[in-house]
Image (cartoon, rainbow, N blue to C red):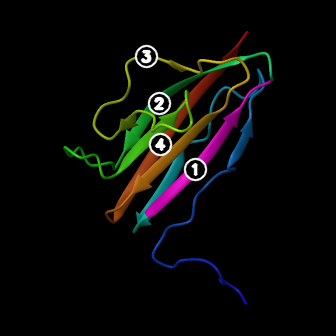
Amino acid sequence: MEGEGKNPLYAECPGEPNILLTPDTPEMEEIRWFNASKFTCYWRIQAPADHYIGVNLTKMEGFKCEQSCYSFVEIKYGNMANSGPRFCCDLPTETLYTEVVGHEVIIITHGYKPGNYSVNLSYSITK
């Protein structure tokens, strides 16, 4: 049945959920949600086994600046058992690098209030 298994209260997640980095893929397309109600989306960024990954969050719109950061962009780039830094107010001022060669980065976006949201990331791979 069409639509089976989908929660109509949550917006669809745009883009490809698994991204394998190469020197030719330095930037993720801008991710947008229009008139989104709620969403939680995940992207896994991987690099060749002998590389580190650097991530820059270059744009973040629609995420309300609140003390508890209910709508956020989280970047997990170290120990995956722990939460990564969450951003809802200000963009990070420096590049976030994986701590281990061949490690992956998980990008999590969460919105809980209706609205328009937008995220843009750039990334690099280094040996």
The label nearer to you, 1 versus 4, is 1
Q: Secondary structure at mark 3?
A: loop
Mark number displayed over residue 42: 1
In this rendering, the answer to whether 116 lies above or below 82 is below
The label nearer to you, 1 versus 2, is 1
* Amino acid type, callout 3: Glu
Residue placed under numbered mark 2 in the picture: 57
Residue placed under numbered mark 4 in the picture: 119
Image quadrant where one finds the C terminus? top right
Asked if disc 1 and disc 4 are in contact, CB closer than 8 Å, the reply is no
Residue 8, x across and y down, in percent: 51, 79
Lower position in the chain sequence, tag 1 or tag 4:
1
CA gap between label 3 and label 1 equals 22 Å
* Amino acid type, callout 2: Leu
Mark number displayed over residue 94: 3
Asked if disc 2 and disc 4 are in contact, CB closer than 8 Å, the reply is yes
CA gap between label 1 and label 4 equals 13 Å
**Numbered range of the magenta stretch:** 39-48
Q: Residue furthest left?
A: 67
CA gap between label 1 and label 2 equals 15 Å
In the rendered view, does 42 fall on the left or right side of 51? Answer: left
Image quadrant where one finds the N terminus? bottom right
Q: How many numbered dots are placed on residues in this image?
A: 4
* Amino acid type, callout 4: Val
Alpha-carbon neighbours of circle 1 within 10 Å: few (<14), some, or many (≥20)?
A: some
CA gap between label 3 and label 4 equals 17 Å
CA gap between label 3 and label 2 equals 9 Å
In the rendered view, does 99 fall on the left or right side of 23? Answer: left
Mark number displayed over residue 24: none
